[in-house]
Image: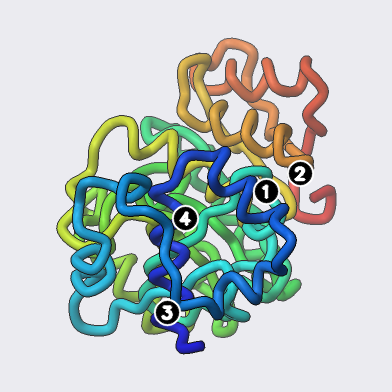
Amino acid sequence: MTSNSALRLCVLLVSCPRHVINSWLFANDTPNQGLASPEHSPATLRRRNNIDGFVSNHGRGMTQTICILDDAFPPPLKMISDPLLVLFYLGDANVMAQQSIAIVGARKCTTVGKLVAEKLAVDLAERGVCAVSGLAYGIDAAAHKGALSRTRGYTAAFLGADLGNIYSRQNKYLRDKIVAQGGALFSEYSHQTQPRPYHFPERNRLISGSAWATVMVEAGEQSGSLITARMALEQGREVFAVTGSPLSEGSKGCHRMIRQGAALVTNANEV
């Protein structure tokens, strides 16, 4: 069976109702036998969009595709309750084979928050840990920069659009540097998928799911980082939070998570 055949089946599974996937998983035939079969599910179970088009238009240039059956698929993502079946990426997907920690926080953050996120990523990189974030402005960008400041510092980013749409746009240079330095960019969205508001909460489950722990550096009470932290808890991963000033609006989300059981940390050693 070719990898393209496996990819096509994974795309087909994405388009199937959950009960269909469950019946496939618990059928008498093993999953490998099912994958090797030339038969397809009834056309009524397919999405209205063309699956062949989804596969063939997955990107341009160096963009590549992996599915959950591939060895390079991020190992932690295989263990979440709703694993992603198809993933697009730029760079070296094997960067996720090493231990990874997610560093997340608000876009509108303080200078101190950026410094903390950057220092955490620097110290984790020196310990051979891959820093995972979302390539957004603020804490995300600071974490990526910190990891990249070390010669063998690797970092990975999960995007809320296709790999050609970088949000925030001022981080396009970071995208290129991440790939050039041996890291990777990942997305569940196929080529020419524009960013939508609901994409970012969706991709947050991948940030938390791809890491063994999530560290929240700065987050307000309405921050999307709280979604990432909640996803991490639901996925059975550790959640850490950096404390801040009790007068800071940007730290209220972190304080809330600490009150609810997140471990308080101030440096990489504590992580």
Q: Which amino acid type is shown beneath numbered disc 2?
A: Arg
Point out which mark residue 80 bears: 1
Report the residue marked by disc 4.
13
Residue at figure coordinates x 73%, y 33% from the top left: 233
Report the residue marked by disc 3.
5
Local crowd size for mark 2, using a 10 Å CA cut-off: few (<14), some (14–19), many (≥20): some
Q: In which quarter of the image is residue 195?
A: top left
Q: How is the image coloured?
A: rainbow
The span from disc 4 to disc 2 (Cα, nearest Å) is 26 Å
Mark nearest the camera among 2 and 1 is 1
Asked if residue 120 shows in the view, the reply is no
Q: Where is residue 189 in the image (x, y as percent from the top left)?
A: 31, 55
**Which numbered disc, 1 or 4, marks the residue that appears first in the sequence?**
4
Helix or strand or loop: what does disc 2 sit on?
loop
**Which numbered disc, 2 or 3, marks the residue that appears first in the sequence?**
3
Mark nearest the camera among 4 and 2 is 4
**Which numbered disc, 2 or 1, marks the residue that appears first in the sequence?**
1
Question: How many marks do you count on the picture?
Answer: 4
Residue at figure coordinates x 82%, y 23% from the top left: 261
* Front residue of this view, candidates 254 and 123: 254
Mark nearest the camera among 1 and 4 is 4
1 and 3 marks in contact (CB < 8 Å): no
184 lies left or right of 162 = right
The span from disc 2 to disc 1 (Cα, nearest Å) is 10 Å
1 and 4 marks in contact (CB < 8 Å): no
The span from disc 1 to disc 4 (Cα, nearest Å) is 17 Å
Q: Where is residue 200 in the image (x, y as percent from the top left)?
A: 38, 38
Report the residue marked by disc 2.
237
The span from disc 1 to disc 3 (Cα, nearest Å) is 24 Å
Local crowd size for mark 1, using a 10 Å CA cut-off: few (<14), some (14–19), many (≥20): many
